[in-house]
Image (cartoon, grey):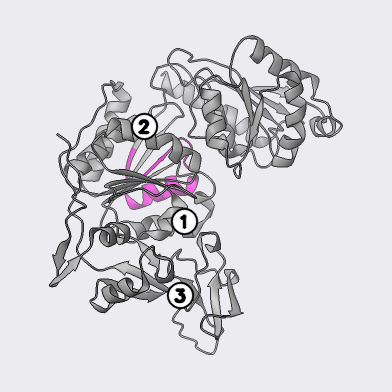
Amino acid sequence: MKHKVQLTKARQYKGIIVEPEIREFFIGKVWSRENTPFSKEKIDRYIENNYFKVKPAISEKHSFFPFFNKKYICNRCSNDNQQEFVEFECARCRKICVYCRHCINMGRMSSCTDLLVWNGPSEKFPKHHILDWNGMFTELQQKASKELLDSIIQRRNHLLHAVCGAGKTEILFPAVFHCLQEGLRICIATPRTDVVLELFPRFQKVFPNTVIHAYYGNAPKQKGTAQLVIATTHQLYRFEEAFDMVIVDEADAFPYTYDISLQKAVWKSKKKGAPVALVTATPSVRILSKVKKDGWGYSFIPKRYHGHSLPVPRFESLWFYERQINKGRIPKKLALWTKSRIEQGEPFFIFFPTIHLMQKAAPLFQQIHPDILSVHAKDPERKEKVMKLRNEEIPGLLTTTILERGVTISNVQVAVVGAESKIFTSSALIQISGRVGRNVNFPGGEIVFFHHGISVEMDAARNEILRLNKEGFQ
């Protein structure tokens, strides 16, 4: 029997009828008053009856020294970097206003903008859910899953540190299922849209009678109130005290690990006392030190779920690769590697350090095979292109670091062009290497770092993979 949140019945609250469409849209969110999908008259009526708390989008920070310059804070994204606030002559209020540049891509927040926070009845979520997963945990997975669940029950923060391909998503299932059965609301956040697109159908399949929403830039509208939300960390700007548990997957990924406001958004989105779990294969020193200092729960899995070693990258010199590509030639070693993958029927990723270089190379690779495609962060068809590779409709993809994590393709082979470039940090190179050998039927594979000189980061990545392999098989 399926249990769904009842959306058709209006509820009475403080003697007033609450429309379910209003409640399900606003509950747990911070939203601009002028950009709601409801009429101004209706929103004003709800405000008059205290269904909303209203606060300015930009507030002035209190200072002990009022003679200093004014200091501002954005109440949507929590940004307080004064260099990212701009004064302007506002046509709406006809005064000098201030807006936040940090979250401008999600709509301008200015000092005369009102934010609405739901103050009406809370949602009562169902407690009867289905966990439709018949997989078996390894001993290490079982241990990590139990440790995570214990932390959640104790409302303690937790770090799940597991190598690429260890089955981190499956380890989350019992903890998420426990929270659902308690009638709690959960968010799984990640810095990358591609990871959201990868996780969403997997959780829909495993929890078939749970209302799940996916939030990312230009996501389609979704009905109902989601008990499980899978979102990019940027989307958490729009939530406040909404979740009983927040899981941050790929917690070391750009831009989350470098953007303090995104980290603040995670803590703002959860209810008081609710636990946060970080999940990553490559935790930063800062994350590890915080876990130790604050007494978080900690789980470590140095071994892949299928028991095979992590593929170790091979270094291959590719002198003056950029000059050759700019002259209209694919370097010989790279061309031979690509042709070999096509001849053997092996799908492949080729990572490039910049979009410009990748776009220069794309037509050259299409001379080898016309169906080779390229993809980058702003490509509107990136979801479809990855699906084409997964469905064996194309032989391979040229890509930037946008696909360094969260994407699983059976038997994929990987090359990195310009592995010495600054964009390829040791953690990025480890994540890229982790795309290879994830499937139990194809546990090996090729990962090659084509370079114009071996970097410290390349050495660090290979040494860490070797260390994890040694530790995993002790």
**304 and 226: which one is in front?**
226
* Quarter location, residue 456: top right
Vertical comparison of 61 with 428: above or below: below
Which element carries disc 1, helix, strand or loop?
Answer: helix
Sequence-earlier tag: 1 or 2 = 2
The residues bearing labels 3 and 1 have C-alpha atoms spaced at a distance of: 21 Å
Observer-nearest of 246 and 360: 360
Among all residues in the image, which is located at the extreme bottom?
67
Percent position (x, y) of residue 405?
51, 35
Q: Nearer the viewer, mark 3 or mark 1?
A: 3
Q: Using a 10 Å C-alpha cutoff, classify the residue at mark 2 as few (fewer than 14 neighbours), some (14 to 19) or many (20 or more).
A: few
Residue hosting label 3: 113
**Residue 209: numbered disc:** none
Task: Tell me where the magenta segment starts and ends, as one range.
Answer: 276-298
The residue carrying mark 1 is 262
Residue 263 spot, x, y in % from top left: 44, 55
Q: Amino acid at mark 3?
A: Thr
Q: Check the picture and name the quadrant holding the N terminus.
A: top left
In the image, residue 77 lies in the stretch drawn in magenta: no
For the residues labelled 1 and 2, the Cα–Cα distance comes to: 25 Å
Task: Tell me which amino acid carries mark 1.
Answer: Leu
Looking at the image, the residue that sits furthest to the right is 327
At numbered mark 3, what does the secondary structure look like: helix, strand or loop? Answer: loop
Whichever of labels 3 and 2 marks the residue nearer the N terminus, that label is 3
